[in-house]
Amino acid sequence: METLSIYAPKLVTNKEYIASGHRACSGCGEVLAVRYVCKALGRNTIISNATGCMEIISTPLPETAWEVPWIHTLFENASAVASGIESGLKSLKRKHGYTKEVKVVAMGGDGATADIGLQSLSGAMERGHDFIYVCYDNEAYMNTGIQRSSETPFGASTTTAPSGKNSLGQHTQKKNMAAIAAAHNIAYVATSCSSYPFDIMSKVEKAMKVKGPSYIHILSVCPTGWRCASNLTIKLGRLAVETGIFPMYEIENGKYTLNIDLPKLRPVEDYLKLQGRFRHLDKDITAEIQEKVFDEYNKVKRLAAGNKAK
Amino acid sequence: MKQGDTIEIRWHGRGGQGAVTSADLTAMSAIHEGKFAQAFPSFGPERRGAPVLAFNRISAEHPIRVRSGVVKPDIVVVLDPGLVTLINVVDGLKPGGCLIVNSTRSIEDLQGEFSGDWTLAVVDASSIARELLRVNIVNTTMLGAMIKTAGAIKMDSLTEPLEEKFGARAKANLEACHKAFDTTVIGKITVGGQKKVRTFAVAKQPTWSELLVGCAVTDVGSTKRFCTGDWKSQHPVWDDKKCIKCGICSLFCPEFCINQQKDGYFRSNDFYCKGCGICAQECWTQAIKMVEEA
Ligand SMILES: Cc1ncc(C[n+]2csc(CCOP(=O)(O)OP(=O)(O)O)c2C)c(N)n1
Ligand code: SF4
Ligand code: SF4
Ligand code: SF4
């Protein structure tokens, strides 16, 4: 638990930009991530949202949960629509004396970000549009019933990568979207997690100060797809970080900073055993996962240390 | 399209409670008996915890061609006790049909909720499931009550489908089924027997001509009108003596429905709380307890 959070009510604005009455599953971590992102963004924001859970649960016509301008896009074009909005705002300023500072934000799930919308995201980052991309990553296509994506971790059982006699579930490794974003040489890239509201909010605030593209990747716990109890949402996000499975870091102009640097990582079992999607894993596979976690964590650690030495 | 002998069943549950599995098992058993059967859920945008429907059609004689949802059921099974007063579970139930309810309430008490020429069956499936399966998931337990009351399938034909779906856990599930069969109380509902008349809100959908261009919605934050509070099967209760007013519960509530009161203590808004239990899990002084809905 972050020490800061003990004064929560005094530190966080009461204002919500996404309303109660949304239709997310009981215990949804993704809607929490969106809530914190929106609190940091504030009123002067336009959101372009790829289809997925957050779109479906927030806009059951004729209602909307949104309290900022929000546009529903297709799967593949959230960043293209954000590019258009940002260009339109620029043009309004140049030609019509529009002066308001408005932040353009594109949002999508892991499927929308790492698979289907990747080309439009890459294009928008490469063209240098002034926007923030937020990926809330629940590690599968949850809205349509838990299909694997390129962000689904090794060993997780999904409906399209089911575990069984001859399969351990997902057999590929999780795609590193933060590194892909950083490879576009953008000024700000960060990873965060739905269990760390203060971390999310401070990273969004940093991203807002950047002129040009920035990318935030938020691991978001999904009790339905991860097959865990709904009250464990916050605990599981914390365990993902404390086991080193999901390191939280920033890449500012190419320089890595590890935000939560643990002297000792918890064993991955602590995280895996609470989730039905990993229930079938045996000792050997768990050991393999543990190995891989150390490798990846140390990679980030070295990148961050190299940065300190400079 | 009337299809002679077809029996139609409607299952009422909550997302995550397994009404779909009940329907699946029913159809598999019927097919096992050499009958024709179908099972399918009704999909909406609502998620885990929200009221959901599943349907069955069974015929001993014809292949079943109808693919639409069941609106005039012969049998209605209600998995969640709270749904009886929340939605009109008897909507379209045919005269002479069966209503089968999981509840701790007495049969006399429940008879007063309805008016119609129906059979009513009550079983405390939650207690059975908790005792024999160690979880409050009553989808298999309620099959026992359904078999006893309406006999749409035979108990024996359930064994194989249960094994196929549950493997090693089939035995406990079958036991729960039998216990429900033995303890289900059956009575009658009569026309005019209803003590208190209820009305159920139905959301109005706009017609095409009322939609704004691009389906724009200008009524910001309007989901606030929608009650998600009836999705819950448990609710948080605060012990203020233990509370240090840190606000963590409020920060982590996915319904954004825990607010600080004038006295500085925190409470959830029952209208939105979905009963996820996060607040109770995260409160570091354990000032919050989750209590099952009556
Ligand atoms: C091109 C296209 N393919 C498939 C779909 C159906 N679809 C809608 S949402 C969704 C899943 C979204 O998954 P993700 O982006 O990971 O977000 P999540 O729902 O997990 O938040 C799918 C497959 C679609 N709308 N468009
Ligand atoms: S499926 Fe997962 S991400 Fe989607 S609303 Fe439910 S809990 Fe949230
Ligand atoms: S988390 Fe617990 S101690 Fe903190 S405000 Fe809520 S009830 Fe009180
Ligand atoms: S159980 Fe607690 S955290 Fe969950 S919705 Fe209700 S008030 Fe919010």
Image (spheres, coloured by chain):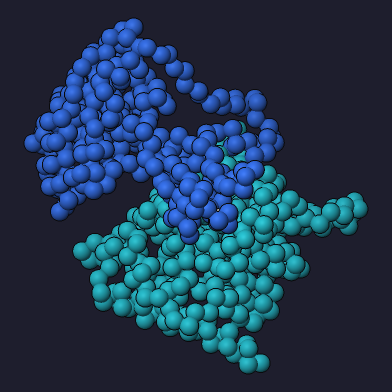
Q: Would residue A284 be found to the left or right of residue B269 on screen? A: left
Residue at the (30%, 37%) spot, across then down: B19
Answer above or below: position of B21 versus B5.
below
Residue A236 appears in the rendering: yes
User: Residue B196, image x and y in percent?
Assistant: 41, 14
Q: Please name the residue shown 28% across and 9% down the image.
A: B190
Q: Is residue A39 left or right of residue A44?
A: left
- Please identify the quadrant where the C terminus of chain A is shown: bottom right
Q: How many marks?
A: 0
Q: Position of residue B232 (x, y in %)?
A: 42, 39
Q: Position of residue B142 (x, y in %)?
A: 22, 34
Q: Which chain is cyan?
A: A
Along the horizontal axis of the image, is B175 left or right of A123? Answer: left
Depicted A85 relative to depicted A168: above or below = above
Residue drawn at the location 52% of the way across and 61% of the way down: A195
Question: Which residue reaches farthest top?
Answer: B192
Nearer to us in this view, A97 or A63:
A63
Reply above or below: B207 against A11.
Answer: above
Quarter of the view holding residue A187: bottom right
Q: Is residue A160 visible?
A: no
In this picture, is B175 found above or below A173? above
- The tint chain B carries is blue
Of A242 and B246, the residue lying toward us: B246
Residue at 63 percent of width and 77 percent of height: A251
**Quarter-wise, where is residue A148 in the image?**
bottom left
> Outermost residue, left direction?
B156
